Image (tube, helix red, strand yellow):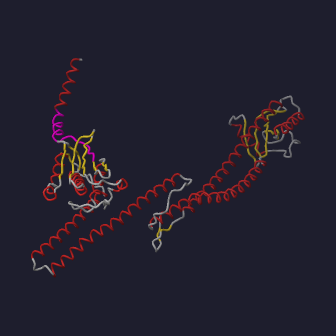
Amino acid sequence: MVKRKKNGAKTGRSLNLVLWFCFSLFAIVVVLVFTVVQNALVDRHYRKKTMERLGTASTWLLGSIGPNTGEQEAVNLIVDAYKSYGVSGYLITSDGQSVFPDLTDQKSYPALAETLNKAFLNGDQSAVVSLGNTLIYAVETSFGGQNCYLCVTKSLESLNDLEEGMGLISFVMVLVAIVLSFAASGLVAVLITKPVNEVTERAKQLARGDYSLDFKENYFCREINELSEALDHARVEISKADKMQQEVIANVSHDFKTPLTMIKAYASMIREISGDDKEKRDAHAKIIIDESDRLTALVLDLLDISKLRAGFGADERTVFNLSEEVYRVAERFDYLKDTAGYQIETEVESDLYISANRARTEQVLYNLIGNAVNYTGQDKKVKVRLFVKGQNLRFEVVDSGVGIKQEEIPTIWDRYYRSSETHKRPVKGTGLGLSIVKGILEAHGYPFGIESKEGKGSVFWVEFFPAPKEEDVENERAEEPVKKKKKEKKKDSSEGEG
């Protein structure tokens, strides 16, 4: 859980500390587990090898001591077993008396005899008994005409000494492992957290508006490299957005300031000067209305850009006749023929359909034709064309203006772009038209571009994706049941012939 201080800063455990603690704990656990498992395996292995040696020595003694073996010879064989196998041996009767009393310090083994008597009652061939630190392997045999037990023994004191030594070694290993793990884990934690801290610090600088820093660096970790690249990409995009926002605010402020100043000025003139003069009052009122319309258009265009950035550029698509739409939009500029002498030629192939947002498409057509009207040459000619090109429908608007400089073409779609050439603007605009066109076409996924040479005019083009006519779709839907019935009928007839 992350807590917050009173000043709003986040508090919590440091990643460095968490990594150091986890690595250290892991190393300690590994060493402890290794020590415990090692001691258990050593004990098990030692006992197993001891049992194998006792069994081998017992088998050898049974084969060597027989009914005719003398007492001294038997004693010598037991001594040889000690020398060969490192084990001791003796014979005891069922009541615990030693057959060779001079062979061992102890003359009787009543407790051992009682244990062996019980063990061999079950019909076992051998028995293993632990008495103190001694492991005893016993088998039944006979010597000197009486039944007895051959006991081959091995002291476990060496195992205890080994375990004590290993315990001390394990303790030292744990201490060394703890020290080394602390040091190693601290070093690893620093190596891991250092680039994270660097990226975090740069991200804080980015949040404060410093776009000059560079996140890209060759870190040792692929994930951190990917994070730094993503943050650097975000830095570039945020920098562009911030710059664009500043430009938009500056331009909008300027565009708002001029009409608002004029509205206020002419409103004051109406109140103080032309209030009683109808002709002047109407002229001043007309200017106020025109400037208000300009403000309204600017606000609407800004709203359109906001909607396009929010992803509402291609919603509600319908199939419609693009040819008729081009004619209808071009006719909206007919007033310029009589008032300003403009000539708008149309070359449009008929019955070309697309599936798109109709209102947005109309906006694209109007803005492109209006832009061509504003920037065409002295002949005041604009050509609008729509034709089939390959698999797409190509729409072109051609003007005869001075063209666009090559270095300006990449920025032609930017907001508030203005050509460096002076020109008259018969179609009033806000400077946002081409930016809106770009947003709409990108939302639909339509290719678009500009072909321009200085002194030879410009061609703005868009390639729409064709769609079937609405009546064709309806007819196809109506014919589907008939086609389906014919297919089924054909299938039935072929099965009947078979």
| Region in magenta | 462-481
Q: Is residue 480 above or below residue 247?
A: above
Which residue lies at the image location 32% right of the left edge and 50% below the top edge? 453
**Residue 118 shows in the view:** yes
- Magenta stretch prevailing secondary structure: helix
**Residue 415 shows in the view:** no
Decide which of 44, 105 is in the foreground and name it. Answer: 44
Q: Is residue 347 above or below residue 65?
A: below
Q: Number of numbered discs present?
A: 0
Q: Position of residue 471 (x, y in %)?
A: 15, 40
Q: Quadrant of residue 294?
A: bottom left
Which residue lies at the image location 45% right of the left edge and 68% below the top edge? 208
User: Is 108 colored magenta in this rendering?
Assistant: no
Whether residue 450 sits left or right of residue 217 in the image: it is left
Q: Position of residue 359 (x, y in %)?
A: 21, 53
Q: Position of residue 394 (x, y in %)?
A: 25, 44
The C terminus, quarter of image: top left
User: Is 469 colored magenta in this rendering?
Assistant: yes
Residue farthest to the right?
A: 72
Decide which of 414, 126 is in the foreground and name it. Answer: 414
Which residue lies at the image location 21% right of the left edge and 19% below the top edge? 496
